[in-house]
Amino acid sequence: MTKFLNILKIAFKNIFSNKLRSILTMLGLIIGVASVIILVGIGNGTQENVTSQVKSLGTDVLTLNIQDNDYALSYSDIDEMLEINNVEAIAPYKTVSATVKYQTTNSSRASIIATTDKYMSIMNYTISSGRLMSVIDLENNSKVCLLGSDIAEKLFELSNPVGQDIQINGDNYTVIGVITEVGSSMGNNVDDMIIIPYTTAKYLGSDTSINTAYIKVSNEDYIEQTTTLLENYITNKLGITTDYFTVSSQDSMIDTFTNVNNSLSILLGGIASISLIVGGIGVMNVMLVSVTERTKEIGIRKALGAKRRDILLQFLIEALVLCALGGLIGVVLGIGVGELLGKMGYSFSPSINITLIAFLSSVIIGIVFGIFPANKASKLNPIDALHAE
């Protein structure tokens, strides 16, 4: 034990006696470990963020997407789909591009959503003031709208928007309610959107064909059976093949995104790991230089009775300590930068397993790339080593 502590003491002494060289040697490992932690952490954070957004819709909601406009649904199709067992409500969904204005205040960031009165309940959105959209608004093609909290504040500042008129593509729309603050959901900033009756989309230059719809089921235990019934209806009744549409549940969306995210995380982690290998090569080069510089020291130690394994262990531990320090600094740097990115608005969730793997990888690299220089040092002939210049 005493011998090991002495070897460890000498290893730290040699590392800190050449601080700049040691830091430059560890740099590749530091960057590699930090990069793996940051990239995988961002991937995990993004996955958690998307998963929470999808789950916020509820596990009792299905999403219908038709990719080809030639096969769009009509209102009568929606009414028939409501007769399918376990289907409780359906809300068609269409995004419309339009210019929004209130008096002299302009906003080009607002997302116009054309839908029905069922949309709010299906998506679990509520209003903070005013009223919800009604069936009468749809039947009368009423030019009314619901505002997200951000767009309401942007257009009206501190005044109450309910009952006021805004201009959408020059047409007056009466604000009937303000949506309670939600945040981003499924890639959309709900607080910055405007909801209008689906039947008024035609006034904004859009048709009323249905390519996307959200479907609420009565019993989430039968979500798979309901999905099959909907697919059969669309295929058999409407003649649309499964090549042109999808009916997906929130769980399937989460699974799909998780698989994609895992693949990307592995790819990004693999790319970042290249820095670890480069760092390992740097460690080996420096240790070879160290062997050359300390040839006489090796010769003296062997002449005084040091065995081959002592010399091998000395240089191997030095490489190991160098890589372990680099890995430790990389872990601290990676978590620190990740947390900083989190405060800047990026999704970051560090993985304990990945952090441990990254650190252990740097240690393993110290062993692998330190063996050759250590072995070379241990094989030096003491007489030749003492005569080295």
Image (tube, rainbow, N blue to C red):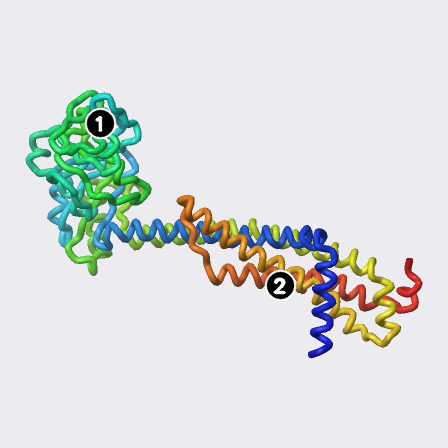
Please tell me how crowded label 1 is: few (under 14), some (14-19), or many (20+) other residues with Cα within 10 Å.
some
Residue at the spot 20% in from the left edge and 43% down from the top edge: 180
Please tell me how crowded label 2 is: few (under 14), some (14-19), or many (20+) other residues with Cα within 10 Å.
many
The three-letter code of the residue at mark 2 reads: Val
* In front of the other: 236 or 30: 30
- Residue that mark 2 sits on: 363
Residue at the spot 64% in from the left edge and 54% down from the top edge: 277
To which quarter of the image does residue 362 belong? bottom right
To which quarter of the image does residue 219 belong? bottom left
Distance of label 2 from label 1 (alpha carbons):
61 Å
User: Looking at the image, which residue sits at the far front?
Assistant: 158
Picture coordinates of residue 179, whole percent (x, y): 19, 41
In the rendered image, is residue 242 in sight?
Answer: no
* In front of the other: 270 or 169: 169
Residue at the spot 86% in from the left edge and 75% down from the top edge: 304
Q: Nearer the viewer, mark 2 or mark 1?
A: 2
In the image, residue 15 sits, relative to residue 202, either above or below, namely below
Q: Callout 1: helix, strand or loop?
A: loop
* In front of the other: 357 or 334: 334
Q: How many marks?
A: 2
Picture coordinates of residue 379, whole percent (x, y): 83, 68
Residue 7 is left or right of residue 64, and the answer is: right
- Residue that mark 1 sits on: 206
Residue 320 is left or right of residue 301, and the answer is: left
